[in-house]
Image: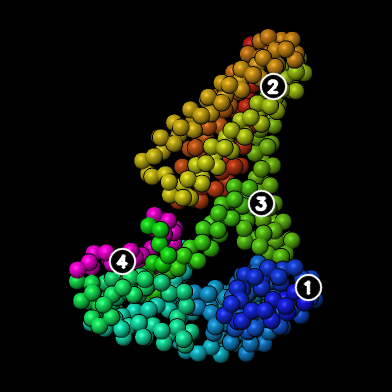
Amino acid sequence: MDRLEKYLKLHNLSEIYPSDIAKILKTFENNEFLKALKIVPLDILGDIALSLPDRYFSDIIENFSVTDLSYAISQLESDDQTDFMQKFEILNKLKAVKVFETLNEVDKKEISTLQRYHEDEAGAYMQLEIFTAEKKEIVENVIKRFARLRKENSLENVQNLFIVNEKNHLEYTIGLEDLLIFDFSKTLEDNLNNNSDNFEPKFAKDKDSIKDVVHSFEAYDLSVMPIVNSKGILLGRITSDDIYDIIQDEATEQMYNLAGVNDDAEDDNEILNASKKRAIWLSLNLFTAIIASSVIGLFTDTLNNMVALAVLMPIVASMGGNAGTQSLTVVVRQLALGEISQGDAMRIITKEVTIALGNGLFFAIIMGVIASIWFNIPMLGVVIALSMLINLFMAGFFGAIIPLLLKKIDVDPAIGSTVILTTVTDIVGFFSFLGLATYILL
């Protein structure tokens, strides 16, 4: 508590970063956390709530009145207001409705507008607060209007002026630093005449995939992107801070999916819910493990005749699994970053198979020599070397082709890839090793 009070006393409200407050709040135990919330200024309560992990959100909405929450939401930008209300409705629908009814008509209309978009659409992430002007306006008047809006806190995080026509169609995007070197006594149109091509806007449509928007931000090094509808009418903007959040969320989801974990369940504070989600993937893994074990069962006589095979068998499967995971991780990540085009499949498969074969040959020789010396059976070294070469080849091939096929059928390449790959490398590893041992050694 003392640390938070000291921080608040040392900083003006305009100097406070919600992420700093959130970091301090996370150090408190439950009772202290609730007490600390009461001294947080309501002006930034909404930003702090969105900066904290989801497990804290219920404490915030349960420990503040409808009036306080309504005021806190009114201080947020439109996209953050929508995020806040969506989380609120999930946790406490009745109270969320009461808070929504107390908001002013403008806020209610903006929240309702943004909630109509699907979470994969660009429109769901845009802010409706934008700074616009028409070409006929005098630059000096535009700058004075911008200064007034900033003083009134009607606009935040503005880097661009959007030029629209009388029907609100987007025509140009001007950075504020460029606006400052315009001739203030002339109209925007007069200033644009000589170099209008430099201000052609990079924009997205409200129904475009948010993933495409993220790639555009990365490709053109953008800080903000205007969003228009199908008729070219300017609706809002997406800023880089929202893009950073999307990238982080996608990376987290991808990592969880590769491990067979549901990211929404892991953010939930209910252990039972997270356990159920994990159990689904563990059940699938158990089923595939039984299939792999059944392959071993086909060679019971071979294993009984040569105990060394049981000692070496896990090495073949383990090396294949690790090599496959390397290929899988690289391909999944490159797909997520948009670095693999539709015609790239053969190039990617060739690359991963070549790498796997190169490593397979190298480690097959090493392991073949070790096995021969270890058990004093030269042909055993040949068997494990051939088996490792086969399994690493298959690991590279399936590590590349599984995510590519999933992407082809519009399934997240990270979902289920690891389980499928592990099953393949285990079965191929066990079958090739024990099959070759049966044929060559017995």
Determine whether the residue tagged by mark 3 lies in a helix, strand or loop: helix
Residue at the (43%, 46%) spot, across then down: 339
Q: CA distance from mark 1 to mark 4?
A: 49 Å
Is there CB contact under 8 Å for labels 3 and 4?
Answer: no
Please provide percent x and percent y for residue 257. 59, 51
Residue at the disc numbered 1: 30
Looking at the rendered image, the disc whose residue lies closer to the viewer, 1 or 3, is 1
Q: Earlier in the sequence, mark 2 or mark 4?
A: 4
In this picture, is 268 found above or below 349? below
Residue 213 in the magenta stretch? The answer is yes
Taking 34 as reference, is 420 left or right?
left
User: Can the viewer see residue 441?
Assistant: no
For badge 4, the amino acid type reads Pro
Q: CA distance from mark 1 to mark 3?
A: 32 Å
Residue at the disc numbered 2: 299
Residue at the (61%, 81%) spot, across then down: 12
In this picture, is 277 found above or below 130? above
